[in-house]
Image (tube, helix red, strand yellow):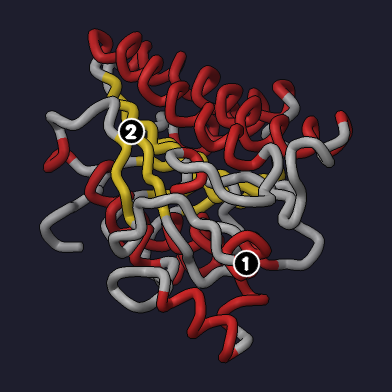
Amino acid sequence: MNEFHLGNKVAVVTGGRRGIGRSIALAFARAGADVAVCDAVVEDGKLGEVAEEIKAVGRRSLGCKVDVSKRNEVDAMVEAALATFGRIDILANCAGVWTPGQTLLECTEETWDRVMEPNLKGTFFCCAAVGREMVRQKAGNIINLSSQAGLNPVTAVGAYSISKAGIIMLTRQLALELAGHGVRVNALAPGIVKTDFTRGVWSDPDAGRAMAAMIPVGRMAEPDEIAWPAVFLASDESSYITGAVINVDGGWQVPVTDKVASTYGPG
């Protein structure tokens, strides 16, 4: 945290009320950034709690409701962040959904859209809206959340793996287009992370052991173990890294076919 300092920077984090997004938002704040933490859900109070936690570590915060699949709401999110902080230096795209236990042949048009709209289209909308501001600033840093499922096919996750693969190409294309404007774009590809998405695995001792046995380091990741690589990518210490996809997977870089993994999926 002390080495990868984000002092005087402003970050926007989508999907920030829980899981990996929450951990990234808090890690950014602990590293010195002011943070606009954004999510589609505010009714359960968790988004407000994260905003208060950011303030508790001495940073400014903004809680913002946004459905990233709606361009007008993304534009409003950017406007709110700029009105509050004056600039945006970092964007972390963590919002997304998935559909476990479904093959592509079982995937309906409605389900396809429900996955693709927040995961891929929403990431694009956020990259485009914030990226335009970063180009004007001639500086900025975008971090997209992909998955090991975006690198290797996983049994019965339907459209999810395709959406995460799309995020990888989106990251590389934007990195190429924005490098000359001082904007870096990278992606993280987590493996199995202990979040609400995977609660069915890690809350069940037998399923948890079966999953851990598939991972070379022998365990699932904690959300903070994804957050600190994001801090590194957001920091000036990674200034020569752009267009990269960084595996944060405990060594798990092969297709996952085990029944447990097929049911609960990667990060």
Looking at the picture, how far across and down is residue 50, in whole percent?
56, 64
Q: Answer yes or no: do the residues labelled 2 and 1 have beta carbons within 8 Å?
A: no
Q: Nearer the viewer, residue 97 or 88?
A: 97
- Image quadrant holding the N terminus, namely bottom left
Q: Earlier in the sequence, mark 2 or mark 1?
A: 2
Residue 259: which disc? 1
Left or right: where 183 falls relative to 223 = left
Q: Which residue is labeled 2 in the image?
A: 186
Q: Is residue 92 visible?
A: no
Q: Nearer the viewer, residue 135 or 238?
A: 238
Residue located at (24% from left, 27% from top): 242
Looking at the picture, how far across and down is residue 168, in whole percent?
43, 30
Residue located at (64% from left, 64% from top): 264
Whether residue 213 is situated above or below residue 152 in the rendered picture? below
Q: Nearer the viewer, residue 191 or 95?
A: 191
Identify the secondary structure beneath mark 2.
Answer: strand
Residue located at (67% from left, 48% from top): 157
Whether residue 117 is situated above or below residue 197 in the rendered picture? above
- Label 2: how many Cα within 10 Å (few below 14, some 14–19, many 20+): many
Q: Is residue 89 visible?
A: yes
Task: Work out how far the residue at label 2 is from the one at label 1, CA to CA, in angstroms.
Answer: 31 Å
Whether residue 170 is situated above or below residue 95 in the rendered picture? above
Looking at the picture, how far across and down is residue 150, in whole percent?
49, 39
> Residue 116 appears in which quarter of the rendering?
top right
How many numbered marks have been drawn onto this rendered protein structure?
2
Looking at the rendered structure, the kind of residue marked 2 is Asn
